[in-house]
Amino acid sequence: MSGAAPEGYDPHAFEPFAVTVDLAVFTVRDTQLHVLLVERGEDPYKGRWALPGGFVLPRESAGDAARRELAEETGLSENTVSALHLEQLATYSDPDRDPRMRVVSVAYTALVPDLPEPRGGGDAASAGWWDAGELGALAFDHDRILADAQIRIGAKLEYTCLATAFCPPEFTLGELQQVYETVWDVELDRPNFRRKVLTTPGFVQAAQGSPRRTGGRGKPAALYRAGAATTLHPPLLRPEGRST
């Protein structure tokens, strides 16, 4: 298939603009929701904190750019990045969102288990996990992107199995419950939560052959892995009147 423009079509008839990707990456640390931020090492907004991201290269898809930028700007390995749950969130196209030129951003969100401290790379001076409830103003329109991403993950936890993406490969039901309580900012009834999880087909499966996890008082807790299901039937709804 030829890459030449069709006859009569002028590719210079429209003003060019750039396409970027921005990533809202969440994890649960110390019972708090944290987001991955990078300190900008260049203008505009040099020294300000922002979501990881960057420009999409000419022969690159937005998804490939998102994975590349996440690896470059955080120091996470390619294997780690490829295993993350990364999904497209929305497109942000306000003409004045970037002072350099017209820039359209395709935003992604990722849910990850607790990871080691990242290191800045590319044009990022540094990178780190920040408590999502204690952030100052971010660069560009990243406050809006981050708010939209939090709403998305809070809703998806009700009708999908994505909560397990916050957990290590083997986890206790208490750790899974902590994910819901942290993202939703609620306190759930332990026996009721356990019953809902274990009676939902394909949500979790027992980690056969793995020793129970000890710690604290009481008997050791059984370990589970993510099940084969991707959606929850019935959904696991957050308590009424509470939202993130």
Image: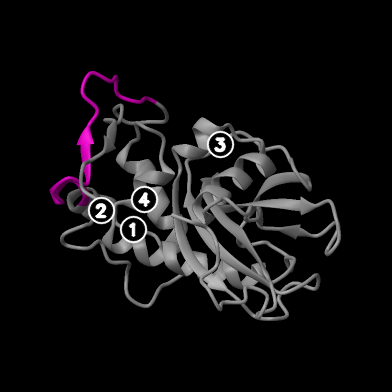
Which stretch appears magenta? 197-214
Say how the picture is coloured. one colour
Labels 2 and 1: the sequence-earlier one? 1
Judging by the rendered image, the residue that carries numbered circle 4 is 163
Res 193 label: 2
Kind of residue at badge 4: Ala
Labels 4 and 2: the sequence-earlier one? 4
Q: Badge 1, how many Cα within 10 Å: few under 14, some, many 20+?
A: some
For discs 4 and 2, the disc positioned in front in the rendered view: 4
Judging by the rendered image, the residue that carries numbered circle 1 is 188
- CA separation, marks 3 and 2? 26 Å
For discs 1 and 3, the disc positioned in front in the rendered view: 3
Q: Label 1 near label 2: C-beta < 8 Å?
A: yes
Judging by the rendered image, the residue that carries numbered circle 3 is 115
Kind of residue at badge 1: Leu
What residue is shown at x 35% (from left), y 35% (from top)?
171
Image location (x, y in percent) of residue 233: 16, 59
Q: Label 2 near label 3: C-beta < 8 Å?
A: no
Q: Is residue 180 left or right of residue 39?
A: left
What residue is shown at x 69% (from left), y 44% (from top)?
73
Q: Secondary structure at mark 4?
A: helix
Kind of residue at badge 3: Leu
Q: Secondary structure at mark 3?
A: loop
